């Protein structure tokens, strides 16, 4: 993790965020992995996902926030005007800026 400290989540609220869910497989794996860290509560927050996927995630997380559950879902990218990939370099730069804030 590039020297970054792990965040202790035991007995805390963990919020898992994604740009959207299609099948939900990655989020399901994330929720299961987070459960092993014993948070008090797991909240999943996404802007868009199909109804069936949201229902499945609700069965695993303690609370789910999904802003849009389109009747006809064709993919996460369809909910965005621009859906470009974020490079590892961009993410690393953003994290370094966050670390330098007071």
Image (cartoon, rainbow, N blue to C red):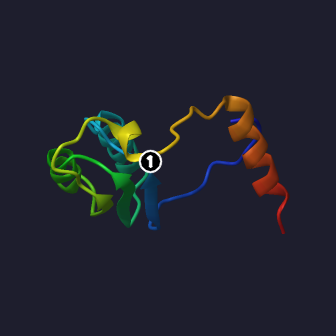
Identify the residue at horizontal 36%, vertical 35% (top origin). 26
Identify the residue at horizontal 38%, vertical 55% (top origin). 47
In the image shown, does 25 or 31 lie closer to the viewer?
A: 25
Residue 52, given in percent of the width and then of the height, sits at 14, 46
In the image shown, does 92 or 59 lie closer to the viewer?
A: 92
Q: Quadrant of the N terminus?
A: top right
Relative placement, left or right, of 88 versus 79 is: right
Q: In the rendered view, tell whether residue 60 sits above or below residue 23.
A: below
Q: Which residue is mark 1?
A: 18
Residue 88, given in percent of the width and then of the height, sits at 68, 30
In the image shown, does 67 or 45 lie closer to the viewer?
A: 67
Residue 13, given in percent of the width and then of the height, sits at 44, 67
Query: Residue 42: which quarter of the image?
Result: bottom left
Relative placement, left or right, of 71 versus 24 is: left
**Other residues around mark 1 within 10 Å, as few (<14) / some (14–19) / many (≥20):** few
Q: In the rendered view, tell whether residue 29 sits above or below residue 43.
A: above
In the image shown, does 38 or 86 lie closer to the viewer?
A: 86
Q: How many marks?
A: 1
Relative placement, left or right, of 64 versus 19 is: left
Residue 4, given in percent of the width and then of the height, sits at 73, 44
Q: Secondary structure at mark 1?
A: loop
Query: Residue 76: which quarter of the image?
Result: top left
Q: In the rendered view, tell whether residue 69 sits above or below residue 4.
A: below
Q: Quadrant of the C terminus?
A: bottom right
Identify the residue at horizontal 63%, vertical 48% (top origin). 6
Identify the residue at horizontal 23%, vertical 54% (top origin). 69
Q: In the rendered view, tell whether residue 64 sits above or below residue 4.
A: below
């Amino acid at each position: 993790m590039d020297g970054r400290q792990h965040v202790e989540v035991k007995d805390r609220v963990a919020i898992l965020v994604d740009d959207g869910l299609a099948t939900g497989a990655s989020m399901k794996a994330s929720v299961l992995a987070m459960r092993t860290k014993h948070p008090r509560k797991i909240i999943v927050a996404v802007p868009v996902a199909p109804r069936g996927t949201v229902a499945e995630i609700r069965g695993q997380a303690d609370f789910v926030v999904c802003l849009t559950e389109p009747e006809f879902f064709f993919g996460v990218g369809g909910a965005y005007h621009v859906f470009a990939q974020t490079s590892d370099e961009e993410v690393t730069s953003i994290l370094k800026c966050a670390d330098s804030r007071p």
